[in-house]
Image: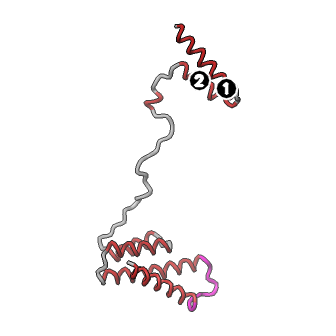
């Protein structure tokens, strides 16, 4: 694996250097330079993908190398698909792999919980917590007193 990695990286580096030495177009902006770099990488990866298939390198290994460099140089998905199809004739991209979550997270109180009856003491406590006075430090005292009173009422009754 290290052999192919070194060859691919050296080839890409050499082509980029040749471009910098001989191929810079006057007035080319950053975006155009970035696109040219991606084109160089795409061509090199396509060539080496084909060469690795010719040398009967394991398809999974070749795909891993090509994918690694394609991601490193931020090639678009369409280019990566083309490169993978060069290596593996049976390659089919799995669309929307990451767009749909594996499970949906629902926020809020579930219906079954909303249908449960809340004891009166909890309703009062809940109302106290939600009220504006809950921001004051006296809320804790009010809650403690209310719960103590309710407990006394329950013991008496």
Q: Quadrant of residue 141?
A: top right
Furthest toward the bottom, the residue is 22
In percent of width and height, residue 58 lies at 30, 75
Q: Identify the residue shown where x is 60% and y is 17%.
A: 148
Q: Which mark is residue 139?
A: 1
Q: Main secondary structure of the magenta part?
A: loop
In percent of width and height, residue 2 lies at 40, 79
Residue occupied by mark 2 = 125
Q: Quadrant of residue 89?
A: bottom left
Q: Identify the residue shown where x is 70% and y is 29%.
A: 137
From which residue to which does the magenta span run?
21-30
Would you call the spot at circle 2 few (<14 residues within 10 Å), some (14-19), or many (20 or more)? Answer: some
Q: Who is closer to the viewer here, 4 or 94?
A: 4
Seen in the picture, residue 99 relative to 45 is either above or below; the reply is above
In percent of width and height, residue 103 lies at 41, 48
Left/right of residue 116 with respect to residue 128 in the rendered view: left
Seen in the picture, residue 130 relative to 154 is either above or below; the reply is below
């Amino acid at each position: 694996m290290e052999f192919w990695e070194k060859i691919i990286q050296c080839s890409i580096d050499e082509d980029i250097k040749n471009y910098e030495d001989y191929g810079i177009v006057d007035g080319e902006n950053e975006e155009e330079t970035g696109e040219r770099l991606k084109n160089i990488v795409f061509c090199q990866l396509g060539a080496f993908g084909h060469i690795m298939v010719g040398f009967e390198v394991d398809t999974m290994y070749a795909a891993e190398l090509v994918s690694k460099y394609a991601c490193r140089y931020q090639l678009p998905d369409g280019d990566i698909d083309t490169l993978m199809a060069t290596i593996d004739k049976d390659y089919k991209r799995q669309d929307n792999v990451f767009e749909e979550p594996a499970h949906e997270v629902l926020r809020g109180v579930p219906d079954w919980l909303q249908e449960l009856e809340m004891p009166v003491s909890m309703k009062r406590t809940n109302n106290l917590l939600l009220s504006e006075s809950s921001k004051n430090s006296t809320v804790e005292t009010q809650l403690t007193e209310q719960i103590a009173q309710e407990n006394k009422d329950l013991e008496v009754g």
